[in-house]
Amino acid sequence: MIRKSIKKVGIGGALVALVALSTMVSVPSSQAAAKKKGGLISIITVDIKNPFWAAEVATAQSEAKKLGYTTKAAAHNGDVNKQSSLIDAAIANHSVAIILDNAGADASIGPITKAKKAHIPVFLVNAEINKTGLAVSQIVSNNAQGAAIGGAQFVKAMNSTGTYVELYGNPTDNNAEVRSSGYKTVISQYPGMSNLQKEVANWDQQQGFAKMQTMIQAHPDIKGVIAGNDEMALGAIAALAAAGKTNVVVGGFDGNANAVAAVKSGKMAYTVLQPITQLSKMAVDQADKYIKTGKTGVPEKQTVDCTLITKANAGKYTSWALSK
């Protein structure tokens, strides 16, 4: 009887062990992921020298550090091949996530696909791609809404009449066309306004300066300049000042500190603030949640509205935001 009792206990212990092992093996992957913390988040942007993208990177780095991650930041400068190499490096470095301001709506699909196949989640900030289901999140400013309020303010500053020119961003970036189309939709409602020329300046201040010089020569009597971003607008202001034209209406888009200063001084009529620091923080927070739980809890495509900055409210500006 004693031997049988011992045998039964042995079998029971084995069963308990098997049940425990089975429970360990069947733990949902989301629960296992929830135990993860830390790791490298690769941040890939367009141009760290540009204040807009510099703010994007600085915010992402700060938020990631606060959440316990290390970061590595780099810029592709609009070069799709360099972007591909940077994503390859992020994969090789075993990044737990990639925060990406991409180099093109179509050209970025391939590199992002590589990251997805390597099981590295990608979170897009500021610029979308022309495909869903690859990036975990695509978080952008509401560029159509921003262009609408910017276009309306431009019309107001121009008193609904006069000739103007346009500085256009990078053609591979969907934001450039969305803003340009938004401007046109609003301004075309005013027959007294006429667009004389549109030039690509790739979001760059020096290119904005050079293209503006050319347009001043072609159209010496222009009354306004509407730009796809602040850097191009600031380049236009410098070219206009060099030509002695200080009464031309100039409108921008981004809300960087230099543009807001120009609005305060009257050199720029307005700028449209897009909340890049908010977008960047959202991307890192969603990456953290995804790493830990396997989901973000929000849709892939997300937009945040822009805010108009004029001389009337520019004093409330506090580093890529308006104080409440």
Image (cartoon, rainbow, N blue to C red):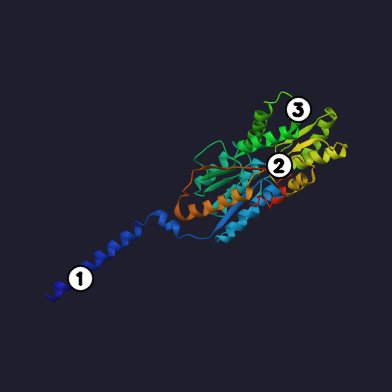
Q: Is residue 283 left or right of residue 11?
A: right
The foreground one among 281 and 79 is: 281
Q: What residue type is labelled 2?
A: Thr
Disc 1: which residue:
9
The foreground one among 35 and 89 is: 35
**Residue 94 point in image, percent of width and height:** 54, 54
Disc 3: which residue:
161
> Can see residue 50?
no
| Secondary structure beneath label 3 | loop
- How far is the residue under mark 3 from the one under mark 2? 20 Å
Q: In which quarter of the image is the N terminus?
A: bottom left
Disc 2: which residue:
271
Q: How would you rate the neighbour count of disc 2 (Cα within 10 Å): few for under 14, some for 14-19, many for 20 or more?
A: many
Q: Are marks 1 and 3 in contact (CB under 8 Å)?
A: no
Q: Which of marks 1 and 2 is nearer the N terminus?
A: 1
**Residue 89 point in image, percent of width and height:** 60, 51
Label 1 vs label 2, nearer the camera: 2
> Can see residue 118?
yes
- How far is the residue under mark 1 from the one under mark 3? 94 Å
Which residue is at a point 77% across and 45% down the rendered structure image?
262
